[in-house]
Every structure is written in structure tokens, then in C-alpha cells.
Image (tube, grey):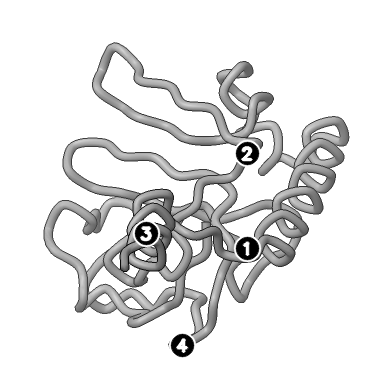
């Protein structure tokens, strides 16, 4: 999945994305470049808000969560490395297997744990290669319509 930044400040976010307790306000400037494309490594949806985990402009060794309204989706194909999980509290996550199977994977990753850092580095390489080398595939319906139109007298 690939997205393009269309805004990089909190002024473009509605109240569900703002949280002054963690420093996310209308004045917040996110480490994003307008018009730059980013690859999504995981995403979650909770209580009406969607967050993308990307390697933003401040990337060091782990992806940061960024609010979806700051982006437009330019390639909506999901990674073949992603898995899907819905939790009892309503949280929905799409992420690679290790992230979903270990409840504390992201915490360990942000703490710089060697195993989690190596796992993310490898999965990042795989997802990057998948996104950057994948040619858009024709929609099946579109192919059927084209074939039908060509076959008609």
C-alpha cells in the first residue's frame, strides 16, 4: 500500500485524531513532506480513526504512526505479508505476522530490541520490494469487459 502526503499539520485533522495529552494538537507539525509518497507497513483503525505506520521523514529504525487524513491512497493493494486482526475492544489491525502475534512487538521495536529490529528490517525490505516492483494489475471485471467488447461483432 502506498500513500501520498497531502497535509502535514494538525489543522487538517478532526477531533478524533487530536490528543493534547500526547502533544497532538492543531499546531502539531508531522515529519512529513507534502506530495511525497510513503509505503505503509501496518495500519490500524480504532474509534473512527485510521493510522498508517510509515517510515516518515524522521525515520531511524521503526515506523511511526501517522493519521490517515494527512494522506491520499495512491496504491490500495494490501501487502501479501499482512495479516488481519480484530480485537475484543474493536481495534482492527493490518500488519505482518510477527507484529500481530506478539502483543508487545511494536513496543520492543521502538525500544530498539535487536530481534524485533532485525525482523522489521527484513519485512521492510520485502514490503518495499513488493510495492516498488508490483505493476498494477487489471481489475478482473475490467478485463472481462474488454474481452467482451473485443469479441463482439
Cα separation between marks 2 and 3:
22 Å
Q: Earlier in the sequence, mark 4 or mark 1?
A: 4
Instruction: Name the quadrant of the C terminus.
Output: bottom left
Q: Secondary structure at mark 2?
A: loop
Q: Which of 8/18 is in front? A: 8
Cα separation between marks 4 and 2:
26 Å
Q: Residues within 10 Å of mark 4 (few under 14, many from 20)?
A: few
The mark lying in front, picked from 1 and 2, is 2
Q: Secondary structure at mark 1?
A: loop
Q: Secondary structure at mark 3?
A: helix
Cα separation between marks 4 and 3:
29 Å
The mark lying in front, picked from 4 and 3, is 3
Cα separation between marks 1 and 2:
19 Å
**Residue position for label 1:** 55
Q: Are marks 4 and 1 in contact (CB under 8 Å)?
A: no
Could you say which disc has been placed on residue 142 in the image? 3
Could you say which disc has been placed on residue 35 in the image? 4
Q: How many marks?
A: 4
Choose top left, top right, bottom left or bottom right for residue 96.
top right
Q: Which of 83/21 is in front? A: 83
The percent position of residue 127, horizontal first and vertical second, equals: 70, 51
Q: Which of 84/88 is in front? A: 84
Amino acid at each position: 500500500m502506498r500513500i501520498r502526503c497531502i497535509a502535514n499539520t494538525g489543522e487538517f485533522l478532526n477531533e478524533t485524531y487530536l490528543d493534547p495529552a500526547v502533544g497532538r494538537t492543531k499546531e502539531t507539525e508531522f515529519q512529513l513532506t507534502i506530495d511525497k509518497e510513503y509505503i505503509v507497513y501496518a495500519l490500524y483503525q480504532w474509534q473512527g480513526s485510521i493510522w498508517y505506520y510509515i517510515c516518515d521523514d524522521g525515520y531511524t529504525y521503526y515506523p511511526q504512526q501517522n493519521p490517515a487524513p494527512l494522506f491520499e491512497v495512491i496504491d490500495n493493494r494490501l501487502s501479501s505479508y499482512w495479516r488481519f486482526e480484530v480485537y475484543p475492544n474493536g481495534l482492527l489491525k493490518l500488519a505482518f505476522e510477527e507484529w500481530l502475534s506478539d502483543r508487545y512487538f511494536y513496543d520492543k521495536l521502538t525500544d530498539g530490541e535487536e530481534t524485533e529490529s532485525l525482523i522489521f528490517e527484513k519485512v521492510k525490505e520485502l514490503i518495499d520490494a513488493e510495492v516498488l516492483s508490483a505493476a498494477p494489475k487489471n481489475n478482473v471485471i475490467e478485463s472481462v469487459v474488454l474481452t467482451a467488447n473485443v469479441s463482439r461483432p
